[in-house]
Amino acid sequence: MNALPPRARVAAAGETPTGSDGGGDARRVRTTCPYCGVGCGVVASVGAAASGERPVPETIAIAGDPQHPANLGRLCSKGSALADVLGQEGRLLHPQVDGRRTDWDGALDRVASGFREAIAAHGPDSVAFYLSGQLLTEDYYLANKLMKGFIGSANVDTNSRLCMASTVAGQKRAFGSDTVPGSYEDLELADLVVVTGANLAWCHPVLFQRIQAARRRRPGMRLVVIDPRRTATADEADLHLAIASDGDTALFNGLLHHLIATGAVDRTYVERHTTGFADAEAAVAGADLAATAAATGLASARLQDFFRAFAGTERVVTLFSQGVNQSEAGTDKVNAILNAHLATGRIGRPGMGPFSLTGQPNAMGGREVGGLANQLAAHMEIEDPRHRALVGQFWDAPAMARKPGLRAVELFQAVAAGRIKALWIMATNPVASLPDNAAVEAALAACPFVVVSDVTAATDTARHADVLLPAAAWGEKDGTVTNSERRISRQRAFLPLPGEARPDWWIIAQVARRMGWARAFDHDGPAAIYREHAALSAWRNGGSRDFDIGVHAGLSDAAYDGLQPVQWPLPAEGGGGGTGRLFGNGAFHTPDGRARFLALAPPDPAPATPARPVLLNTGRIRDQWHTMTRTALSARLSAHYAEPFAELHPETARQHGIGPADLVAIESAHGRILVRALVTARQQPGMAFVPMHWNDQTSAAGRVGRLLAPRIDPVSGQPALKRMPVALHRFPAAWYAFAVSVDRPDPGGLPDLPYWALARCRRGWRLELAGDRPAGDPASVAATLLGTAGDGEQVYADAAGGSFRLARFAGDRLVASLHLARRPVAVSRAWLAGMLDREMPASQDRMALLAGRPGSDRPDPGATVCACFDVGANTILQAVGRGCTTVDAIGASLGAGSNCGSCRAEIGELIRHAGS
Ligand code: SF4
């Protein structure tokens, strides 16, 4: 079969397609950010390019869409830097089979035959898809349809399992449906916002800025943050509860106990609209203040503050995210939160309700089409025979899956056990993101047939692929995504497809056609898929299921092109205006229409032990996204943190003999990593925090998933990523080094180098290194790492002291610099990186380069704080010294903190530090 590749429709200069504002030489296309679940609207302004050429990133301007209801024009640092990641560096541009370039027909035929042969020999449950919250709803829909309706297995799961599966399970237990009841507007209308298990200021920054703006308008509005760490979000809270790890169920049980004891339960609501309250009440009978304080590690007085605030405030929203979900008891934590809202009847009304925040841009869309192995499409249940029949009829499916499939962690365990013979991974990097990822890597290496479709050529996962398929990236693909408030928005293409890259939906449909199901996968574009998805949601629904977007079943292609952001449900009879709140009438999707209380016992998670005395927590940082395959391409996003690190409390560091800037080896029963120590009182004693982002492409040993056990919540299947007993050891480095280079350095050239971390800087690269054996001849080290390009060098060497410094020039330009020492290298990294590729005539004082610091006549910006305006800590401190003593004054003077606002908490801390 000839594969005829489609081209995404890209508006021409001056053309004004629906969803775009044309005019002049630039095209302005309205689309949606591809990072977090806030789902911000973006306007991409694309400059003119030569005929047939792809516009270069420098001609593309990214701005927040003032008309998008999620962000009203705001973007965070990641969204603002989207143009930085639109180049073709590292792109997978051509199909490959067995490491060799081929054409699409050859690659697609190989995928189809690989799956067909596995199914014929071992049955449909011997194959699996592993999908991603990065996929668009239309991609997700087709993948799910192919596996569950035509192959006949439910082995299709997604990295969203790692993100919000516990919320899905908890909401279904309580509401009978996977429904987020409220809207972002409720966060602004609330008088009390409770944030638990979410560092909003860094991970959902635009939402946090909306809350902060509302607090400035209404100073009486309170913010309570529940988090073991003093995060940037906690810095801004009226009350921070530094809870013990996995203490959430005990805390919310204690809250329910308090609500009952103080008469704050809405008995009328409970009686009319819920069941199970008596059992829940009995379960919290012992959760008095003292017991809750003991179970959560919180002082009674602070607990009481929180309980009284919750009990005494009608308009309460409780926001929760991965800190709740990523636990062996994540589903119970979710239900403990829902119990408190149901007990007070605070749900589905303005300014109140529980509110889960999704991590990924389309985790919600994946849920809607059945991207999880225990769901069918359109929020139907795979274990319900009526639902199976209904979906089977709609699809005219020859082989409906009859039972739930394997969930993420179980799926890769089945691969390791040899039960999965063919696996297709789309748009995700499980070798870097799943727990126990050394085992995941070994499983992939042993799997007979692995297909990876991705945007990036070199990922920790892609290196195990038998077939590599180049997928379209953000800005090149068309479809829809759904954000955390159930709002469906369009992602629109504004760039042509590079090389032979193709949209995921097209790749899936091509494989399905080759497997013999041409008629069922004859869609000619995402609009046709979306119409089918919408029609299925309404198919014999009649109000029985929450997810209904039937009004979109008849959208024309032009109407789909111009689709405005809108919240589901959107039933055909509802007019299409969207629905902001649900459950306000007390009617739920359980068989009796009542919400369910759950009787919950706090978990008894794995404790620290004498051998592994520290509890590891993982999470995200402000300027990176997932496994860095895109955000690491941006110099400004890489400036905030340029190497993997572990936050340690000073007491914990002291106990382990670890000093600031030392390297620390962290070991668990599953593996070992090596990261920089960041000693800070933000962390609790006895805990360590390591970001999830670093991978084998950006560091020697920074992949934190190596340490994590593959433990899951038994209800949701979500892995526990927030609590792992580990041992810490100071790494006995014999030498440390820091380098900058206009060309990509090659740390792999130094054999058995235990530590390196590579990051982009504006005109090149920066590299941290350390070794535990003597470095050898420093000049050879420099040549191996940095090559020999250039025509002039300046060198300082102190063999006895173990110190070596080199600055290399091409003409008058600095092209590379290396600082090597026996102790952690103390140079101004931001300044050195900023000097790269700069003209520096020999007549100037080049000695400053060897010193690693600017002369006294030049400013040293210090470590980057504001990524939007590239403002460093020293620059901010100097402005404080000049009298800028508020965050707004710093913004007015330097710009820092005045764009996305993600760094406002850090600026505030610098001001406080300067004043102390
Ligand atoms: Fe993108 Fe930032 Fe908005 Fe999230 S908050 S959708 S990362 S711009």
Image: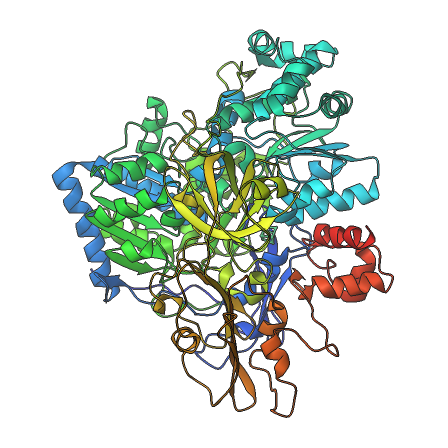
Q: In this view, does 105 lie above or below 268?
A: below
Q: Which of 174 and 199 is in front in this view?
A: 199
Tag count: 0
Q: Which residue is drawn at 45% across and 64% down?
A: 9
Q: Where is residue 835 in the image (x, y as percent from the top left)?
A: 60, 78
Viewed as shown, does residue 424 lie left or right of 205?
Answer: left
Whether residue 148 appears in this view of the structure is no
Q: Residue furthest front?
A: 800
Q: Which of 617 and 98 is in front in this view?
A: 617
Q: Nearer the viewer, residue 670 or 55?
A: 670
Corner quadrant of residue 833? bottom right
Viewed as shown, does residue 259 lie left or right of 27?
Answer: right
Q: Position of residue 128 (x, y in %)?
A: 28, 41
Q: Is residue 364 above or below residue 264?
A: below
Q: Which residue lies furthest to the right in this view?
A: 883
Q: Which residue is drawn at 79% across and 50% down?
A: 912
Q: Which coloring applies here?
A: rainbow
Tell me the quarter of the image containing the N terminus.
Answer: bottom left
Q: Where is residue 129 in the image (x, y as percent from the top left)?
A: 31, 44
Corner quadrant of residue 783? bottom left
Whether residue 574 appears in this view of the structure is yes
Viewed as shown, does residue 566 lie left or right of 91?
Answer: right
Q: Which residue is drawn at 14% across and 46% down?
A: 117
Corner quadrant of residue 778? bottom left
Q: Position of residue 852 (x, y in %)?
A: 61, 73
